[in-house]
Amino acid sequence: MNVATLLDSLTVFVLAILLGFEVISKVPATLHTPLMSGTNSIHGIVLVGAIGLAATANNPLAGGLAFVAMAFAGANVVGGYWVTDRMLQMFKRRPTQATDRAAK
Amino acid sequence: MNATNIGYLVQLAFIAGAALFVMGLHLMNSPASARTGNRLSATGMIVAVVAELIQVTQAGVGLVNWAIIIGGLVVGGGLGLRMARTIAMTSMPQLVSLFNAVGGGAAALLALNDFIALDGQRVLAGGSPGLDGWRTLFILADVLIGSVTFTGSLVASAKLMGMIRGQPIVIPLGRIVSWIVVISALSVSIVLILSGAGVVTYDPEILYVLLVAALVCALVFGLLMVLPIGGADMPVVISLLNAFTGTAVSMAGFVVGNVMLIVAGALVGASGAILTRLMATAMNRSIGNILVGGFGAAEGTQTALSGADGTIREVSVDDAAIQLAYASKVIIVPGYGLAVAQAQHGVRELADLLEARGIEVSYAIHPVAGRMPGHMNVLLAEANVPYPQLREMDDINPEFERTDVALIVGANDVTNPAARTDHSSPIYGMPILDVDHARSIIVLKRSMGRGYAGIDNPLYLNPKTGMFFADAKKGLAELITAVKAL
């Protein structure tokens, strides 16, 4: 890793943290659970790294690690986005009575 | 199109993906746009994954490697989807914890693999460095943080699922073992980084042993960190572990040289940090204090509620129903007890009845009502409570003065006025809901049991307070019947 790459990466890192603080501090407390599960799915981006790893794995150890990483990240991404969507669709301004079946 | 151009396009796709993440998070600033936001973010993920697939295809992928990619994705994605579709909303915290665990775990695996691959190259090239000091530093940061998150989140999840006792689990010599583990992990890391930088030279076998040692130390530390933490402190722990996962993913981005991982990880890290701070403030405890653990465990000095201060007044179902039905403004204060009793729907039904009588009803949500940040809001939204009625603490506190009845269901410590007045109280200074400012207060509670902090609540002795002893779900059903009969 040369110093130029390192500095570029650090720049991106610092700016992204500041941007994150700025954007996320505007999220209302009402949505903190979906926010957390939504950011949870975002960290599923390790999937991209896992794909790169799986594509170049050339021995059983690397292959095994890559498979587990793929499965972990895959669960993280798919499950995370799905459950966040499931939660967010429940937030309604004026809910319809028809959907209220789970009460019993 | 040649490989270089495709490489540039892939980089552009990563930038687009990162931008979609940020825009998606931005739309989370209102419940009305949040769903679109989540879908934008998911689109960003798809863009990034497709770009990466194109990238690796360009370089050539073997059959076995495709099998690993597709197999891993199908197995993991299938399990994730299954859990996401079936999980109950009350169980959200354990699911989020589980996703924290796998995210952190995947990040740690990336770094481990990178170390092995690069070190392998170095060995093949006869000692010329594939690793360098900086890269080793990020690899170790990723492995350590990712592993702590992995075991820590698994323990948190198991505690929330009830597979492990929710109470703080005290490990003999736990503190000392923790220090030993931390110091070992850090010293091993320093050796590895120096070796990566070429300052010291060891056989590759020794380096692997050291790496595994650092990994094991981090895994053990994750266990030791979360086991002693009680169930009620979970909102802070989950937020903290979320921040850890984000950081681990960022470190993985430094290691594999992918800017998108760095950006995404930083966003998650920022979110986790904000939530951790909010939760800790809402409990009036420092993060260090929570990690040290044992709230209330050593509090033997708390004076018991004496009869001299007042007496407890019980209120009958019919009296409570009359108070509610002839009020003009009612605030409902739900606590975790409500979720435990699965009484969200009962609360909504009662609120609907009251609203039909022209009464203004809203819900006062304390930041730590639930087992993760914002948990109570999701539970009430599931019961079809319209989100404009879900009000944050600071927003609704001034309204209690104009409120006829505050109905408390399954909440205790977050309504305890001692937090405002009693300097000797363990929760002194914790921000609370000002329910005692309401004209009258009805507390729906199973018994006179204490809250998780194990302290008495003077609110129950307030002459304005009527205690309605019942299970939350049954009590609400009785109240509904009584209000209907009026």
Image (spheres, grey):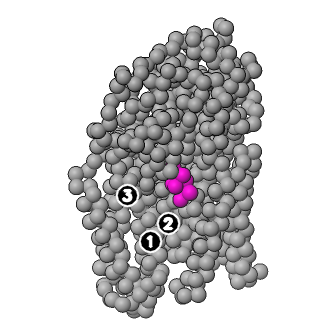
* Magenta run includes residue B275: yes
Q: Is residue B33 above or below residue B464?
A: below
Expressed as whole percent of the image width and height from the top left, the position of residue B369 reads: 53, 39
- Magenta range: B273-279
Query: As shown in the figure, which amino acid type bears the numbered disc 2?
Result: Ala
Is tag 2's residue or tag 1's residue first in the polypeptide sequence? 1
Q: Is residue B241 above or below residue B266?
A: above
- Are there few (<14), some (14-19), or many (20+) residues within 10 Å of tag 3? many
Is tag 3's residue or tag 2's residue first in the polypeptide sequence? 3
Quickly name the residue at label 3.
B222
Q: Is residue B205 above or below residue A45?
A: below
State the CA–CA distance, disc 1 to disc 3. Answer: 14 Å
Q: Residue at horizontal 58%, vertical 22%?
A: B440
Q: Are marks 2 and 1 in contact (CB under 8 Å)?
A: yes
Q: Mark 1: which secondary structure?
A: helix
Q: Residue furthest left?
A: B172
Quadrant for residue B395, please give it.
top right
Which of the pair B27/B437 is nearer the observer?
Answer: B437
State the CA–CA distance, disc 2 to disc 1. Answer: 7 Å
Expressed as whole percent of the image width and height from the top left, the position of residue A4 reads: 59, 87
**Is B464 placed left or right of B211 in the picture?**
right
Q: Is residue B174 above or below residue B399?
A: below
Q: Mark 3: which secondary structure?
A: helix
Q: Residue at horizontal 43%, vertical 92%?
A: B128
Query: As shown in the figure, which amino acid type bears the numbered disc 3?
Result: Gly
Quickly name the residue at label 1.
B141
Residue B248's label in the rendered image is: 2
- Looking at the rendered image, the quarter that the N terminus of chain B falls into is bottom right
**Is B265 placed left or right of B297 in the picture?**
right
Number of on-image labels: 3
